[in-house]
Image (cartoon, rainbow, N blue to C red):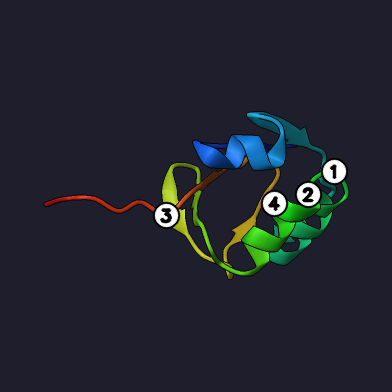
Amino acid sequence: MITVKYFASLKAIAEKEEEQIEVQSSISMDQLSDIISKTSPKMADIIRDNKIMISVNQEMADADTVIHDGDEVAFLPPFSGGS
């Protein structure tokens, strides 16, 4: 099972803060976005378009990262700031 967490404005887009996704084997980020698209098509589009930051097990990841059973995936909106 993969734990998927949505942060900040992405919670509203996904219409949830967190979800558990059952997987039979390791999957790609594209496969995860396909699964997410069934309940949140807008969120899946954002993932596919690389418009967000992704962490896997609290380390920054990218579209090529392989996700394994037991992993935690977090989606974060891009941050800007500083002065």
In the picture of the structure, the residue carrying the numbered disc 2 is 36
Q: Is mark 1 on a helix, strand or loop?
A: loop
* Label 3 to label 2: alpha-carbon separation: 20 Å
As drawn, 18 above or below 71? above
* Label 4 to label 3: alpha-carbon separation: 14 Å
| N-term-proximal mark, 4 vs 3 | 4
In the picture of the structure, the residue carrying the numbered disc 1 is 39
Q: Callout 2: few (<14), some (14-19), or many (20+) C-alpha neighbours within 10 Å? A: many
Task: Single out the mark in the foreground, 4 or 2.
Answer: 4
- Residue sitting at the far left: 83
Looking at the rendered structure, the kind of residue marked 3 is Pro
Left or right of 20 on screen, residue 71: left
In the picture of the structure, the residue carrying the numbered disc 4 is 43
Looking at the rendered structure, the kind of residue marked 2 is Ile
Q: Do the numbered discs 1 and 2 sit on residues whose CB atoms are within 8 Å?
A: yes
Q: Quadrant of residue 12?
A: top right
Q: Report x, y in % for residue 13.
A: 67, 42
| N-term-proximal mark, 3 vs 1 | 1
Q: Residue 78 carries which label?
A: 3
Q: Is mark 2 on a helix, strand or loop?
A: helix
